[in-house]
Amino acid sequence: MNYVSEFDRAPEAERFHLFRRWMNEDPVGVFAAFRDERPIVSTPVATLVFRYRDVVEALSNPTILTVKLYEPKMGNFMLCKDETITNTRDKGIMQAMLSRDDLPEVRALVGTLADAALDGADGEIEVVHQLGRKVPVQLVEQYFGFADLEHETMMRWSYNNQLDAFNNHPFNFQPNPDEIHAKAQQSLEEMKNHLAQFLPRKAQSLQENPAQDDVVARLLKTRFPAELGFDGERLVTCIGGLLIGAVETTQQAVAQIIDGLLKRPVHLEKARAAALADDDALFDRYVWETLRFDPIVKFMFRYAVQDYTLAKGTDRAHTVPAGGIVLPITMSALFDPDEVPLPTEFNVQRQPAIDFHFGFGHHACLGRYVGGVMIPEIVKRVLRRDNLRALGPIDFKGTPFPEDYRLAYGGACSG
């Protein structure tokens, strides 16, 4: 099929819908066609950007191509504040609390939790709920220190807010957007109420046992001067963000990576050999290269607060009008041969920098280093099991996230 010709022949009002269908059916093929023939294209819904350099440009101008669309969903959270004191202050504080010195300990903890989940499932596990959501929630409790709560409630809060913030916009075509938003806001309110009661109890426990060390404990033990503006409200908002960002992205990546490796038996065996040898540096390359072929998001989104010309000075230059939405197609960028040699080949020797798995630039994910060890470690513990096999495809059940994915495996851990 000539995707660009079919796109041009379609009525203008239907073009974006048509593109979304193709993107789900044949992303690599449709992205290649548009990168070559129409690297920046306008539709009534959004401007689509396909080449690596243009995607990077669109994600590198936060004061013009902004994350304003997040604001009605997230309120005053750092992620929806472009180039502001709130963003730089809150992110800086939280990055200090999420010390990279902790990563070996975090990875070891994740491995222990994942093995316990696999052992407890006795040879057959539903990956999404019993592993992909369960382990991050346990990490939120034990390392982040966000506790005293049922796991199901934590999962619900994370799910509702992830669905609303990232998948409930005009270009997502959700059938019930108002209901999705209402559930997310209710979850935020419940979470704030819980934290308002939990944090004083946590502070009291720190007086009795000041040696406690988790992210919430570090925040509560730190004296922030009033002039900094990091008050109790900011504390609650930032702690809540730890939970919201930890669960759904992890479970989706885990499910899709395992599925992708099972569909590539040669690479599966090589990845499994690295897992059994505890060669994390090599194993992680298999993880991220697999995710490149099926990333958890295929595009990001930005809102233009003023006219902006992308790829200015080139023959593909395109002006996005003020008020327009831009969709940098990050998966297309990951297959751009100008930046990614032999992009359709599976190659674990690629430069690790060539990815958008944890966002990009000014809005790179706060938890990217934690996620960067949690995701591969969960996958690693699965691959260490004997006779691993899928009992069916990933079932999204009409949602943007995996909802059911079943694996069978030998009962004992190899190696």
Image (cartoon, helix red, strand yellow):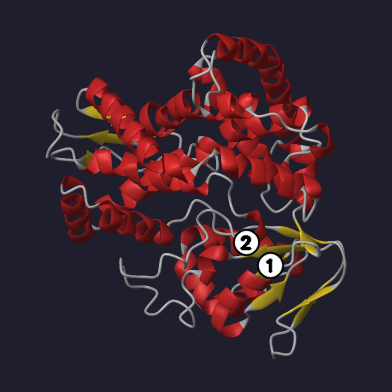
The x and y percentages for residue 8 are 67, 77
* In this picture, residue 363 sits left or right of residue 377: right
- Asked whether 350 or 294 is in front, the reply is 350
Look at label 2 and name its amino acid: Gly
Q: Is residue 168 visible?
A: no
Which residue is pictured at 39% across the width and 45% down the height? 373
Q: Quadrant of residue 122?
A: top left
Q: In the drawing, does residue 15 fall left or right of residue 150?
A: right
| Category of crowding for the residue at label 2, using alpha-carbon neighbours closer than 10 angstroms: few (below 14), some (14–19), many (at least 20) | few
Report the amino acid beneath label 1: Ser
Residue 283: x and y in percent read 27, 54
State the residue at coordinates (36%, 41%): 104
Circle 1 crowding by C-alpha within 10 Å: few under 14, some 14–19, many from 20: some
Query: Is 130 placed above or below 351 here?
Result: above
Q: Which residue is mark 1?
A: 60
Left or right side of 169 for 329? left
Helix, strand or loop status at disc 1: loop
326 or 61: nearer the viewer:
61
Return the mark for residue 361.
2
In the rendered view, does 164 fall on the left or right side of 103? right
Image vertical order of residue 268 relative to residue 168, above or below: below
Whether pointer 1 and pointer 2 mark residues with C-beta atoms closer than 8 Å, the reply is yes
**How far separated are the C-alphas under marks 1 and 2?**
6 Å
Give the residue drawn at x 11%, y 40%. 415
In the rendered structure, find residue 348 and report the number of the disc placed on it: none
Which residue is painted at 54% across and 13% down in the image?
148
Query: Residue 189 in the image: x percent, y percent?
Result: 74, 22
Quarter occupied by residue 50: bottom right
**Vertical placement of residue 313 versus 132, above or below:** below
